[in-house]
Every structure is written in structure tokens, then in C-alpha cells.
Image: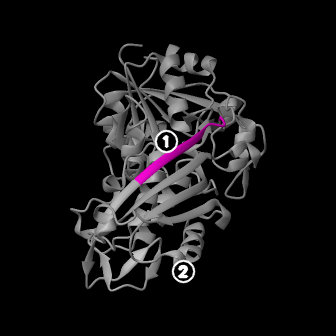
Amino acid sequence: MPDLTLVILAAGNSTRFSLDVKKQWLRIGSKPLWQFVADRLTQASSAKKVIITAHKKELEYMRKHGNYTIIEGARSRQESLKNALKHVDSDYVLVTDVARACVPHEMLNEILKSKGKADIVVPYLEASDTVVYQNETIDREKVKLIQTPQLSRSEVLKKALDRDILYTDDSSAVKAAGGSVFYVKGSTKAKKITIFDDLAMLACLSKPDNTRFSGIGFDVHRFCDDKKMYLGGVKIDSHLGFEAHSDGDVALHALIDALLGAIGYGDIGELYPDTDERYEGIDSKRMLKEVVSFIKEVGFEIENVDLTIIAQTPKLSPYKDSMRETISSILEIAPIRVNIKATTTEKLGFVGRKEGVAVQAVASLHYFDWKRI
């Protein structure tokens, strides 16, 4: 359909999903759910353009997954859709929620075949149970359970949403604005993922693959006077500190880079630029906690990490156990999965001259396996 744009709404917080991972980042094979849905519906609908809304925090990471048009969403579904519609220049727009992951091809074809029959084409299910509204039983034959995707005339939908009223779906907005609605039969196979148990009802979703991911981080900081030294999340007894925009914990910075490298994000500077005053003097443990939270939200689990601290001074052997315990606590993995090594350069180079410290870190991760729960 050459005059069709597909919009996938994937900017939600998954508050009802009750897991650390957000549902749009569950892996289906090797693809996050949003990418799985985008690829599946793009192929089936032949849309000329695909727009995906993303949470602000996930925007840049989504863009690293391929040639998709990713735009920033908003706090509500409706505002996210309005943001997406600004980029729609086709006559028709097909809108769906990322949680509607297994739309059957037959259902989608029925929606697309009905193009032009009304301002919006809407799939629905009949109510099979008794329906009670405000303590009164009503005729279930008159009840429709609305699904997505919904196919709209783009200009009609844009105008319908241009008001200060919050609607739960596109058809409600179009109808309230005086537009026409055409209903087609939906499918129980197009169940929406709201809670974790819904996943068991969706046959099109395969388990995550068992790929392991490794990342390497390396960082260096020079010494400075009159600043407290933190290394591996532990305060070190020294008259020196590290010259840095943050607290200068070179070990945690290398570890953050290793973790980001494993998920293909980039480096610490992309998240915490040293030109941003908000991060001046920031505790590196806070940065690590935020990165670990992000890693879990986008569908990964940390297996183990290994750090090599290269320092002529200070002596680090008294601190290695505390570093291991601190890091394992933040990463929420067993202490045995955190290895801390300390070495010198035999007085060679800037480390040997006691000008600073270098750290190399390696991290191993895998996809969160939602099938095992």
C-alpha cells in the first residue's frame, strides 16, 4: 500500500508488566519486541514508511538497531501518537501498540482491504462473557472490544487528536470529532501484552536466543591533589585523587564502558558527557547503578565482570575484597562473578611514574530469558 505509513507506539514504561525488563525490549530470537513487531507488520502491510515512538531514555539506543525512523514519545499514548503524526505525509496511517505483537496476517489484510470504507477502520472482538456496567447488566451483543492496528485517514486522525481530551484509542477520537468508523472482526490471537502471563498466550513469540555478549572498557585518569580518591566504588586512603569531571573513579568508568560495549550502546561519554554541569562531581556508583538499571530494562542480564587495575600507587591489595563486594552489590550478581586484579607497570610509563591509574574491564552478558520464568 504505497500511501500508507505504519506507526508503532513503543514509548511506554511497562508499569503493569512487573519485571525489570520493559516489554518492548523482550527478545524474540535476537530482536527486541519493538523491532520484531516493526519488521513483521512492515512486511505484511507494505507500508512506505515506518515510525516508531521511543522513551526518551531509549531513543538513541533504539536508533543503533538499524535504519528505522525513531522519534521521541511522550508521557501518554495519545501525545506519543501526536508526535508521530507530525512525521506522517501519507494519505493513510496504520497505528498499533507494540504490545499487540501477534496480529495475524488475515486480520491485517481485512483491515487494509477495508481502506476507504470510513475515516477509520477498527478491528474488534465480540464479548463472550456477561457484561456489567455501573452494576447493571447490559446486552453483550452491543459490546465491542476494540483492538489495534487501526487504519485512519491521516488528516482526519490528526484533526481528531488536536484537542485537550484524552482518548483510549484512535477510533474514540475520530468518532468524537464526527468521523465515520468501520468495524472489522479482530482476532484473539492479537491479544495485547499487558502483564507477564499474557506472553504464554501468544504463539508467535519465540524464546530469546542464547548468544553471549562481551564488552571491553578502558579508562585512564591522572592524579591530582586535594581530592578524595575513589576506586572500584571504595574510598582509598591517599593524599591524591583523580582529575575528572566526576569523582574520577577510573575503575567504575572502565566497567561502565565494558557494560555499554556489550549491549552495543557506545561509551560513558554518550550518557554522561563531561560538558554537562549536571554530572560535575557525580558519584560513579550512581552512574553504574543507572547503567545497570538501563541494561536490565532493555533486556540483558549480567553474567560476570573482570577488572584489571594498573597502578604503581596506591597499594590496592587491602581494598580488592571491598571493591568486589561493592560492585557485585550494584550489579546484583554473586561476588564470585566479579574479579578484581591489580598490577603495576614495573615503573614504566606514566603509571610507573606515579602520574595516574589505568583500568581495563571486561563484561559478559546475555539476553533476559523470559521463557524460563
The numbered dot on residue 182 is none
Horizontal and vertical percent position of residue 289: 49, 66
- Residue 211 belongs to the span the image colors magenta: yes
Residue 139 in sight from this viewpoint: no
Q: Main secondary structure of the magenta part?
A: strand
Residues 146 and 297: in front is: 297
Residues 125 and 92: in front is: 92
Above or below, 302 against 214 in this view is: below
Q: Residue at x 69, y 35 (%)?
A: 207
SS of the residue at dot 2? helix
Residue 169 in sight from this viewpoint: yes
Quarter of the rendering containing residue 106: top right
Quarter of the rendering containing residue 321: bottom right
Q: Residue at x 40, y 70 (%)?
A: 284
Q: Farthest residue in the right direction?
A: 129
Horizontal and vertical percent position of residue 10: 47, 42
Above or below, 343 against 11 in this view is: below
The numbered dot on residue 169 is 1
Amino acid type indicated by mark 1: Asp
- Residue 236 belongs to the span the image colors magenta: no
Q: Give the residues drawn in magenta, as a range.
A: 209-217
Within-10-Å neighbours for mark 2: few <14, some 14–19, many 20+: few
Q: How is the image coloured?
A: one colour
Within-10-Å neighbours for mark 1: few <14, some 14–19, many 20+: some
SS of the residue at dot 1? loop
Quarter of the rendering containing residue 249: bottom left
Amino acid type indicated by mark 2: Pro
* Residue 251 located left or right of residue 27: left
Horizontal and vertical percent position of residue 128: 77, 37
- Residue under circle 2? 318
